[in-house]
Image (spheres, rainbow, N blue to C red):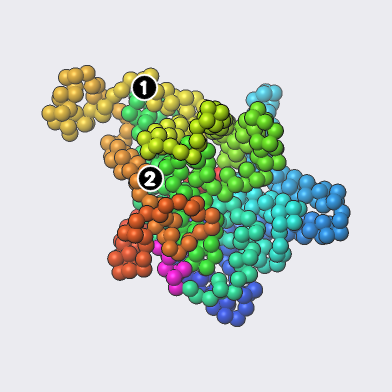
Amino acid sequence: MLFNSYAFIFLFLPFTLFGFFLLGRVSHKFAAGWLAAASLFFYAWWNPIYLALLTASVLFNYTLGLAIVRADAAGRVRHKKRLLVFAIAANLGVLAYYKYANFFLDNLNTALGTAASLGEIILPLGISFFTFTQIAFLADAYQGKAREYSLTHYALFVTYFPHLIAGPILHHGEMMPQFARPEIYRLNYDDIAAGLTIFVVGLFKKVIMADGVGGYVAPVFDAPQAGITLTFLEAWCGALAYTFQLYFDFSGYSDMAVGLSLIFGVRMPINFHSPYKAVNIIDFWRRWHMTLSRFLRDYLYFPLGGNRKGPARRYVNLMATMLLGGLWHGAGWTFVIWGGLHGVYLIINHAWRALRSRLGHELGVSTAWGRALGCFVTFLVVVAGWVVFRADSVTTALAILKGMAGLNGFVVPDTWLVKWGVLGQWLAQHGVIFGPTPALTNGGVVNWIWILLLMVWLAPNTQQIMARFNPALGIPHEPQPGARWQWHPTAAAAAAVAAMALAVAVNLNRHSEFLYFQF
């Protein structure tokens, strides 16, 4: 079930909310059970067959987690370690089968000239998220960090519908205590008002902004396969259109997840914090898919040794982490290359910081111009990475990057010659080439790009606007926007939210899946 659907907004959400708070008056355990059951129904709406997989995963990991805790209490250190290794291997084995089996088999067939086949394997929605969430729980249980073991609360922690399909990746220690708090089972009108506002803002980002600019992406990324040579403007418009489509799609989903959870009085960890404002690539990964970055850092980078064994080992660990992070996003060489690109970016960034430190520079100090330049360069390399991420093949990615580098020439759409009048004639006389640009369906993409660019660089983000209500966990401490940007439950704010909701409702019939569903 999609958040941006009539069934979710007008049936599932009101019915689930009503049942949760009604049962909360009788029994907190019944209310938590109701929310877990509703979350399972939410998941089964897509494909009931995979409900059994999710349920089995929950029961398996809960049982193994308890066994690890009991082995720890009994002092059986080796047995505890064997249980952890077995549980993680089982989780990764299931994930590898559904997500990577055909990818590896196809590459093996190519290498050996064979034709082995497993048939079509349908990827269960959210399998990466609920698998990583439970691996984190197992690791916490092994380290003695898991403190609460109610099966009802654990099932709710894993299946909680706001995060189930596309994250964030939750931690046992930050969610289970909240499900035990009696306050969440009572109506809190401030939380409901703030949560609904954040949800509508997220819907607007997805339905109006992401889906609006998304229509310009496919013609460009499909062009190389159709034999169309992309010129500079076509390639950049397609790359930037996807850059903003992915941004507002993921930002919209993240807002909706936070808002939905806040309606129930539960605060989820923040997962998205204005990543295109990042001043370097390290900063980018502190802002983009923040819970995945946290997971990779805590459960992969640190166990590999982190930065504790010298610069060379640190760079190897960074590259290994990012390659696996790329593969986590999808079974394809473009994802692996994208992860490798970001590994290279991070290595360069860390090496530059180390050099500056040796030269005696104070790393935390920079000028406004320096931060602006850092932000611009970071944005450019991120856009180049997104081209590889989105492309259906390495060949397509290289064709688009070639166009972006200007190697195929610079052509302005011939329709603009008439539109620009005297200016167009003057430009044509001074060497600007006007001609056909088949990969640009129309010139509207340019307006989308500059408007969205100003928004992501200059406007405050949702959690900054809603800062008075502390809507999520882990919001970075930084200067907040002025009072006029702060949300208050006023008539003017309600009118603005209502206008966004109306715009969404008018366009909801063309709802599309979130891009991160496929990962």
| Label 2 sits on residue | 456
Residue 124 in sight here: no
Residue 417 on image: x %, y %: 19, 28
Which residue is depicted at the point 58% across and 58% down?
A: 43
- Reading the chain from its start, which is encountered first: label 1 or label 2? 1
Q: Check disc 2 and report its element: helix, strand or loop.
A: helix
Which secondary structure, mark 1?
A: loop
Residue type, mark 2 in image: Val
Instruction: Name the residue nearer the viewer: 35 or 489.
Output: 489
Which of the pair 423/413 is nearer the observer? 423
Question: Magenta stretch: residue 190 in it?
Answer: yes
Q: Residue 239 location in percent, x, y? A: 40, 34
- Look at the image and give the residue range highlighted in magenta: 189-198
Residue 423 position, x and y percent, is: 15, 28
Which circle marks residue 406 in the picture?
Answer: 1
Q: CA distance from mark 1 to mark 2?
A: 26 Å
* Looking at the image, residue 471 lies above or below residue 368: below
